[in-house]
Amino acid sequence: MAIVFCCVKNCFDGMGFSATPAPRRETNPITLDTNHIGHEVVIVKNGLRICGSGGAITNAPLVQSKSYFEVKIQQSGVWGVGLATLNTDLNRSPGGMDAGSWVFCWDGVFRHNNTEIQKALQHANEGDILGVSYDHVELNFYLNGKNMDSPVTGVKGHVFPVLFVDDGAILDIVLDNFNYPPPQGFEKIMLEQSLL
């Protein structure tokens, strides 16, 4: 029970309470969608942190030609990061277990349709930042700003960023004010009406 409480406390607190209030900035309307989450998923931190067990997609699909977002691994465990359609099973961590998700997982494996697509040369650890770019041809991943050189192709359908967690993992999605510059020509996810 103490371990579960610790993980839930970490999910809500992050690095603890700060005596100095954070400066106010405009809130990004794109967040993890509480209407499209696994049964045992908890979304906190204004819709930007996932913990519990399962997956969550964002409330906005990738409609622009070159999209980029980041994910910070706040706490290790079993996790997956990538893209998914609305048909993916958000109760099966670490993702990539069905035809509707393409994810990079905690064990360094890229998965889709319950198949190991390829294995990365690097593993991401607690505190690392994963960058994700998608141009409707290739899905690419970056580890702390460096391209992992393992493009995933064959992504099909109307896709959304997706995060999966289990076994104590806590992930934060970063949708603007990135830790690393996006690849040339890529930018933050935009709402469809913003593209007009």
Image (cartoon, grey):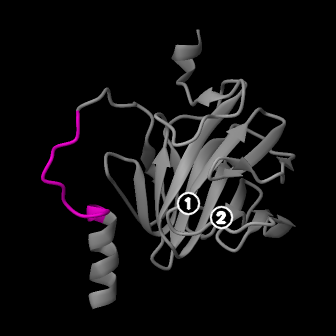
The reply to whether residue 1 is visible in this rendering is no
Provide residue 34's location: percent of width, then percent of height: 40, 50
Residue at 80% across, 65% down? 120
Q: Secondary structure at mark 1?
A: loop
Relative placement, left or right, of 45 versus 167 is left
Q: Between label 1 and label 2, give the one nearer the viewer.
A: 1
Which portion, as a residue range, is magenta? 12-23
Q: Where the N terminus falls, by quadrant? A: bottom left
Q: Main secondary structure of the magenta part?
A: loop
Q: Secondary structure at mark 2?
A: loop
Residue at 74% across, 66% down? 122
Please tell me whether residue 7 is drawn above or below residue 134 in the rendered image: below
Give the spatial CA distance, label 1 vs label 2: 19 Å
Provide residue 46's location: percent of width, then percent of height: 31, 45
Circle 1: residue type: Asp
Label pair 1/2, CB-CB below 8 angstroms: no
- Choose between 119 and 87: the one closer to the eye: 119
Residue at 63% across, 47% down? 131
Relative placement, left or right, of 105 versus 56 is right
Q: Where the C terminus falls, by quadrant? A: top right
Provide residue 126's location: percent of width, then percent of height: 52, 68
Provide residue 127's location: percent of width, then percent of height: 50, 63
Quadrant in the rendering for residue 13: bottom left
Residue at 18% across, 55% down? 18
- Find disc 2 in the rendering and name its residue: 95
Q: Residues within 10 Å of mark 1 (few under 14, many from 20)?
A: some
- Choose between 180 and 192: the one closer to the eye: 180
First in sequence: mark 1 vs mark 2: 2
Q: Residues within 10 Å of mark 2 (few under 14, many from 20)?
A: many
Circle 2: residue type: Gly
- Find disc 1 in the rendering and name its residue: 128
